Image (cartoon, grey):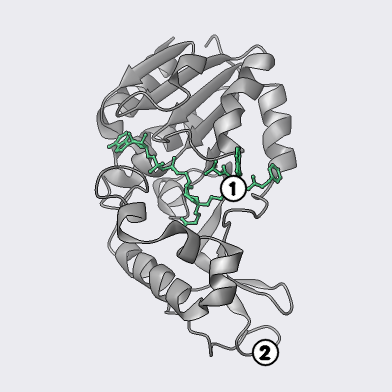
Amino acid sequence: MRFQKIVVLTGAGLSAESGLGTFRDKGGLWEEFDLEAVATPEGFARDPARVHDFYNLRRQRLGTAKPNAAHVALARLEREHKGHVLTVTQNVDPLHEAAGSKNLIHMHGELGRVLCAACGASVAWVCDLSTATACTACGKAGAMRPDVVWFGESPRDMDRIYEALLVSDLFISIGTSGSVYPAAGFVAEARAAGAHTIELNLEPSEGASLFAEAHYGPATKIVPSYVERLLRA
Ligand code: BJW
């Protein structure tokens, strides 16, 4: 294969066909919920119960979701590609790992984990959270929050991501609108490193002109066929 060091960035569009809503499409989560109220530290400080309701609902919706053909194809790419593949997801769902991806970074955190603001413990969590929930590590009640990254907070593992982008020779962006930074800036980092850049999305994203190559359509169609071609090349 022509490419040895691949970085894949995924967004909500990848999980759309698994029944999980995107954020900014018609009918997306930001039409139903106020972003400032539910996805910022300030919104959480003002009304934690409202934020817990939003994430409890998201956790419940996750219940029956299964990985789709696009998640499965990306796990296959990691397994069968002779070089290095790092998948960086903005998604908080667990569908990449359910499909078998192992070299994976959840840069915006995970819906299936909660964080104690008092002691810093992050623990796996499947139930609802409330303002009264006690931390299973330190016992303090009322300091638990979803272990996700809100606007104004630092995304996770950024050093590892930038290191991978710096040596990448192929960057693939899938199912993301390219409207949230720092993820929206990864294509420029990869280009600067000399990588070939590809967008796979339902429609051109905000940063579409930055990509050297693009294929548009539903992820469950275009991702498996692209991975197949890549592995045969
Ligand atoms: C399909 C499909 C199908 C549909 N098949 N495709 C001014 C300028 C620049 C930056 C800033 C600025 N002001 C503030 C900032 C920074 C800010 C930011 O970017 N704001 C923008 C609004 C401008 N960013 C931050 O605050 C971030 N932190 C930060 O920058 O810290 C500083 C720092 C930087 C670097 C190192 C260290 C520190 C944090 C951002 C946190 C984002 N959080 C959320 C919520 C997470 C938890 C949760 O899930 O609730 O993350 S917001 C939401 O947006 C979520 C997503 O991960 C993220 C991206 O959304 P995504 O995935 O792109 O979804 P959509 O809906 O936008 O797009 C879906 C796409 O799929 C569409 O294109 C469809 O066409 C497509 N699609 N169906 C294929 N079947």
Residue 31: x percent and y percent?
31, 54
The disc, 1 or 2, on the residue closer to the chain's N-terminal end is 1
Does residue 202 appear to the left or right of 117 in the view shown? Answer: left
On the image, numbered disc 1 is attached to which residue?
107
The residue depicted at 47 percent of the width and 65 percent of the height is 37
Q: Is residue 206 visible?
A: yes
SS for dot 1:
loop
Disc 1 residue type (three-letter): Met
The residue depicted at 46 percent of the width and 37 percent of the height is 10
Query: Considering only vertical position in the picture, is 47 above or below 69?
Result: below
Q: CA distance from mark 1 to mark 2?
A: 27 Å
| Mark 1 Cβ inside 8 Å of ligand 1 | yes
Does residue 87 appear to the left or right of 72 in the view shown? Answer: right
Residue 138: x percent and y percent?
71, 86
| Mark 2 Cβ inside 8 Å of ligand 1 | no
Label pair 1/2, CB-CB below 8 angstroms: no
On the image, numbered disc 2 is attached to which residue?
140
Q: Nearer the viewer, residue 98 or 15?
A: 15
Q: Quadrant of the C terminus?
A: top left
Residue 231: x percent and y percent?
43, 18
Query: Considering only vertical position in the picture, is 222 above or below 76?
Result: above
